[in-house]
Amino acid sequence: MSAYIGRRLLQMIPLMLGISLVLFAIIQAAPGGPEGALLQTGRMVDARMVEAYRHRLGVDKPVPVQYVRWLGAALSGHLGVSFSSSRPVSRMILERLPATLELMGVSFLLAALVAVALGIFSAVKQYSAFDFFGTGFSFLGIAMPVFWFALILQMVFGVWLKWLPISGTHTPGVTSVMDHLEHLILPAAVLSLRYIAGWSRYLRSSLLGVLRADYVRTARAKGLPERTVVGVHAVRNALIPVVSVMALNLADLFSGAVITETVFSWPGIGRMFVNAMYARDYPLLMGILLLGSVMVLVFNLVADLVYAALDPRIRYD
Amino acid sequence: MAHVRRTLPLLAALALLVAMAACEGGRRDTASRSTGGRRILRIAYPREIDVLNPFTSQNLVDIEFSMMEGLVTTDDHNSYVPVLAKEIPTEANGLVVRRDDGAVAVTWPLHAGVRWHDGVPFTSADVCFTWRFVSSPGSQTYNRDQYLGIKSCDTPNDTTVVFTWDGLYGYYDGLFEAVLPEHVFRGMSADQIVNDAAFNRGRTTIGTGPFKFAEWKSGEYIRVVRNGDYWRGPAYPRIDEIVWSFIPDDNTRLNALKSGDYHWSQIQAVQVKDVVHLPGYQVHLISSNSVMHLDLNVKTARGRLLFGDPDVRRAIFHAVDRRAIADQLMEGTVTLADTPINPTSPYHDGSVQGYVFDPDLARRMLDAAGWRTGPDGVRAKNGQRFSFTLLNRAGSADRTAIGQVIQAQLRDVGIEVKFETLESAAWTQRWRTSTWEAVVSAWFLSADPSLTSLYQCDGPNNMTGMCDPVLDSVMEASDRHLDFAGRKPLLDEVQERLHDDAFTLPIYYNVVPEVVSDAVGDYRGSGTNFGSFWNLWEWTLR
């Protein structure tokens, strides 16, 4: 097993090089450059300043030269300096990462709990009122635009009821945990809805298949109580595909939720990514995208390992 | 299983009740009340800024001005007022002296007893240091070129600074909107200052202003606290703390405001109707120096073919109903613009009357110019259809809507307008390289009324390729006058010629709707690029 993991990790190195090349090319292919940020305020600008700015950032050089420069620095552990803030990219990412991890982590946990319960009940009580409700809820969750749902929650809980704050991670000057949790509720609710909707559908259909399998019928024939049949024999097997989907989704933990973070002014990676994109902040974009790519690779490996742990038929040698 | 069916709804109802009770008990205090006796001003700000150095930031720098002060600022009448300077030098008060060699000595008397936030005295040497930094090639200051006319900076004493200009520059009194502390940057090159993370992020950020830097939480807010050593005396400032929360989403900002969490916010013009009756708040429609306009480009061959004839350009402008755009599209929140200079400025020429909406006149003018309506309803001349592309910027809903109105109205007079929409940075690149036929865009002008850079034949910000040598000479002459009386008639002529030349159609002055809590006193909103926080030192908070 450890040889397998080592091999997979080694394979990631050329893969990451390829990914970085493609990302760099795509980012640079977008029309416009970082100097756009200078000109968007509509102020009259000294034209020589624009050229000096491009020169200082090095974007006046040919793209291959820029890539080689970037790669050289990246290989020595330096992800570069953000164009817009002149700060190290790695530091900016580390600064925003906790907020994203927290929001995504809480949403994942919440979603996992609800989705598993919802999926199991829907499958066991197929075509019951609860199943129809769960199905309706799931389709609503998948279909509803995130920003719209977020704004509605803000209206109801922030503006009308005044129960919950609607932006930021805490009230400036207030350090209590309660205050922070209050700020977390709405964005976590919005984010988890989508995962609940998707995962519960997966689990429902997977469990429905398993419940009709021979070994489940055998378990029932042995006279085992329904709770044991479902809980021990069916759910564990039904979880195999669901857990792989969840593990793949785990990569999102590090790339953030662009819309939710923007609407709730949550200071995470997703929001920073959007700003970096508008500003053509190439080093920051590369940093964030690379982090996301590494995480996709890592969690692909995790998904494979979890798969093997859950399913005794799968062995990696 | 039957008992599960009965207990499940019961449990759910119980959970809901508990949640409601818990929340009811904990109904949030709105943050707009002061906390622990401290008067904390809470501002819902539309963006996160990049750096705290006002000369290198690429954003509008109103947050910085709470901490850093300059020789001057602009007030709510679009005029420069002294801050660290005791008075603004003019020839009348004897502080501007023309020398025989053509040079001009401008003497700025400074307030005595001013200290930086770290206690070090502020002196004339700081002003000269700021000039050396800004005018150096690597300073990245957007209007660096304006500082290049200064040839030397002298400090006869700590409270006097003398600039020697190499000639007459009308904008001499509007520079130095901030002064940098020399002792913080001593020994650094311009590049090092631009990249100095300590100053850019707050660790060493000091100024002479009413508030001191306290905290910058990345992605969330900037907090400043009262400067107890402020030079205007112990009575100022009258607020203990200010928090600028970054809330980029327009709808979230509106919701945040409605929830009562903030004292001040900027909203969009089309959101005004949502807050106009919000209890405890007033909406101020600040007419800004940003003028929304339609530009016709003659730098491209296609542009010259279509827009080369001034009568054709005038016909197009007569076909656009600016009043409808202002009153219906912008819901009456904006002021119609007839010239680029806002009526709040003393340099505005009220005698210029914008193009009246008259489609019949437009049709006659186009006929006379040889553009005849073809079988498809679109005019043509020498086998060329009168069809052009309007370059739109994605995400600018107001500009796109204006473009749609223009499209419909020009179709009425036989002109076809097509759309090309680009994302912001891509749009900017196309616009700067003048590879477009028409755009709706906005300039944000400073309080100084010079328009030379925008409309001079080879002006660095002339994107339309317009060229009127007579206009050039009048604009250049207006830049060489140092007094209002000499400058005003020339700028009047500039505004009249701009109207006649008809390369650019001013549509309206952008409005900045600012929603301010009734608890705030002495707020005096300003539409210049210095923003409404220019007099924070005297704001009060109940």
Image: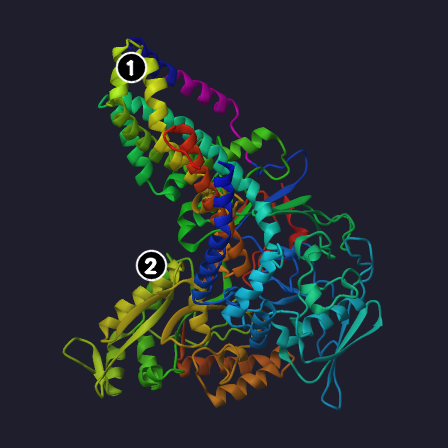
Chain letter for mark 2, please: B
Residue A135, located in which quarter of the rendered image?
top left
Residue B189, located in which quarter of the rendered image?
bottom right
Q: Amino acid at mark 2?
A: Gln
| Residue B338 in sight from this viewpoint | no
Counting other residues with Cα less than 10 Å from the Cα at mark 1, is it few (<14), some (14-19), or many (20 or more)? some
| Residue B53 in sight from this viewpoint | yes
- Mark 2 — residue? B328
Which secondary structure type mostly characterizes the magenta part of the structure? helix
Judged from this view, the residue extending furthest toward the front is A317
Task: Relative to B316, say whether A159 is above or below.
Answer: above
Chain letter for mark 1, please: A
- Is B451 on the left-hand or right-hand side of B330? right
Say yes or no: labels 2 and 1 on the same chain.
no
Of the residues tagged 2 and 1, which is closer to the observer?
1
Mark seen at residue B193: none
- Mark 1 — residue? A219
Residue B179, located in which quarter of the rendered image?
bottom right
Residue beneath the point at 45% across and 49% down? B250
- Is B99 on the left-hand or right-hand side of A313? right
Name the image colouring.
rainbow
Residue beneath the point at 33% across and 86% down? B309
Q: Position of residue B137 (x, y in %)?
A: 66, 75
State yes or no: residue B527 in magenta: no
Counting other residues with Cα less than 10 Å from the Cα at mark 2, is it few (<14), some (14-19), or many (20 or more)? few
Q: Position of residue A44 (x, y in %)?
A: 54, 72
Q: Amino acid at mark 1?
A: Ala
Stretch of the chain drawn in magenta = B13-30
Task: Relative to A317, say whether B160 is above or below.
Answer: below
